[in-house]
Image (tube, rainbow, N blue to C red):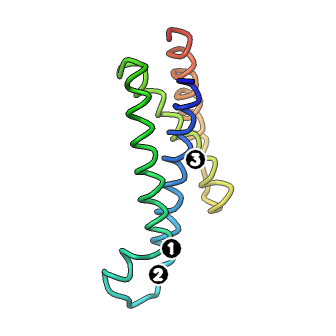
Amino acid sequence: MTALLLAAVCLLTCLGQIAQKFAVESWRGQDSGIAAKLLSPWLLLAVACLGGGLLLWLGVLRRLEVGVAYPMLSLNFVLVTLVASRLFGERIDTRHWLGVALIVGGVALLGLHA
């Protein structure tokens, strides 16, 4: 159950980041005011995803020590990097991929301890 909660937190947080990116991309070339931007569907989706992730995170913290749980959120770097390269066509260099590999290795080591 805890692993499922952690996965859901990571997924919601990643989706929130993607929605934020889509929100700012949708604002390009618009002269709309701050109110219109704050009410954009992408930004509202981002807030909903991040808010849902926060609520599930509280459930994770009830089950795990924060020193074990928090590093698991580093998997968001992996997810966002994959989405950035595939969905947004961002170029990810070798150094970045090596960093992602180190993050995955670190999370795996922590997962063995938990």
Residue position marked by numbered label 1 in the rendering: 25
Q: Amino acid at mark 3?
A: Thr
* Alpha-carbon span between mark 1 and mark 2: 6 Å
**In the shown orientation, is residue 109 left or right of residue 32?**
right
The first of marks 3 and 2 along the sequence is 2
Contact flag, marks 3 and 1 (Cβ < 8 Å): no
Contact flag, marks 1 and 2 (Cβ < 8 Å): yes
* Alpha-carbon span between mark 3 and mark 2: 22 Å
**In the shown orientation, is residue 33 left or right of residue 30?**
left
Circle on res. 68: none
**In the shown orientation, is residue 65 left or right of residue 19?**
left
Residue position marked by numbered label 3 in the rendering: 81
Residue in front for this viewpoint, 108 or 59? 59
Q: Secondary structure at mark 2?
A: loop
Residue in front for this viewpoint, 37 or 75? 37
Q: Is residue 14 above or below residue 23?
A: above
Q: Secondary structure at mark 1?
A: helix
Q: Amino acid at mark 2?
A: Arg
Q: Which residue: 63% across, 47% down?
A: 82
Q: Residue furthest left?
A: 34
Neighbourhood count class around disc 3 (C-alpha, 10 Å): few under 14, some 14–19, many 20 upward: some
Residue 67, located in which quarter of the rendered image?
Answer: top left
Residue in front for this viewpoint, 85 or 38? 38
Q: Which residue: 38% across, 23% down?
A: 62
* Alpha-carbon span between mark 3 and mark 1: 17 Å
Residue 93 x, y percent position in the rendering = 59, 47
Residue position marked by numbered label 2 in the rendering: 28
- Marker count (numbered): 3
Residue 78 x, y percent position in the rendering = 57, 39
Q: Secondary structure at mark 3?
A: helix
